[in-house]
Image (cartoon, grey):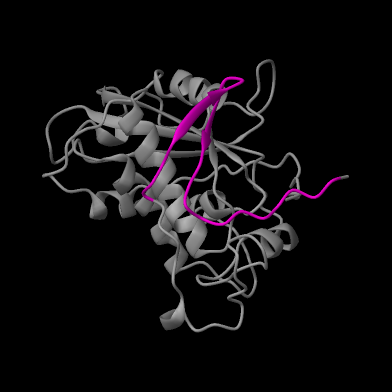
Amino acid sequence: MNHLVTGSRRFELFTFSALLALATNAAAYVPAGTPEFRNEFLAVHNQYRQEHGSPPLTWDFGLEQSAQAWANQCNYKHSPNTGPGARICGESLSCGAPHQTPRSVVEGWISERDIYNFDTHVIDNETGNFAGAVWEATQKLGCGAMPACANIPAMVDNDWHQPVPLYVCHYWPPGSKDSAQAAMNVHRKGYRRPGIYGRDLNSTTEAEIEFAPVSSLVYVHRDNLLKREATVEQEPEIAE
């Protein structure tokens, strides 16, 4: 399937309070760079992308490397998008409870859909992470994390009295703050473009939707890329 490349505008957006509400003390930290870490971030992203009619992402080691490099700085700000070595990908950040997991991080970002306006598609600091996670034209994902950051000012005096993890995810191609672009790439829950998942659900009620399973993941190392092979029906390639 041919995807729309949305241009060079980046998401400069992140959320904090939603992640604190979703974190649970019972969860165990999943180390960055492990198959479990990659599997969980990719599976949860693709679970919600499927709900919003976007094709599944694949894992990219280059994006993982850039995300990890920024996470290593323990700086709860976005990486530079101008100057030498500027970031050209989309970026989402999360910093919260010590027991966050990849799932709770992504679900914190996705929770922004509750306030996203699907009529105007205005993207702001409260909804940009959701838009970036489900952006239809985005194809690749890579994430990194630091397990314990003690020098983040907003988190020094926290309720857990201990350093907190910082998560960074990079997306390519990036999304855009442009509302016209967002209208073409951010869809309501239950939307399906014909062919992406083998069934046109545009006129189907949410109660009737049956999603294909996303838990069956196989990673194949090809050209420094982790490709996701799932049990969803893919649109056939069209010869140029």
Q: Position of residue 232 (x, y in %)?
A: 51, 55
| Front-lying residue, 206 or 116 | 206
The residue positioned 61% from the left and 77% from the top of the image is 202
Residue 14 is at least partly visible in this image: yes
Residue 15 is at least partly visible in this image: no
Quadrant of the image containing the C terminus: top right
| Front-lying residue, 51 or 210 | 210
- Farthest residue, direction top: 84
Q: Position of residue 132 (x, y in %)?
A: 56, 49
Q: Position of residue 42 (x, y in %)?
A: 44, 41
Q: Main secondary structure of the magenta part?
A: loop
The residue positioned 41% from the left and 18% from the top of the image is 73
Compared to residue 240, the image places residue 31 above or below, namely: above
Q: Is residue 163 left or right of residue 88?
A: left
| Front-lying residue, 89 or 13 | 89
> Image quarter for residue 147?
top left
| Front-lying residue, 35 or 229 | 229
Range of the magenta residues? 215-239
**How many callouts does the rendering have?**
0
Residue 222 magenta:
yes
The residue positioned 44% from the left and 22% from the top of the image is 68
Residue 28 magenta:
no
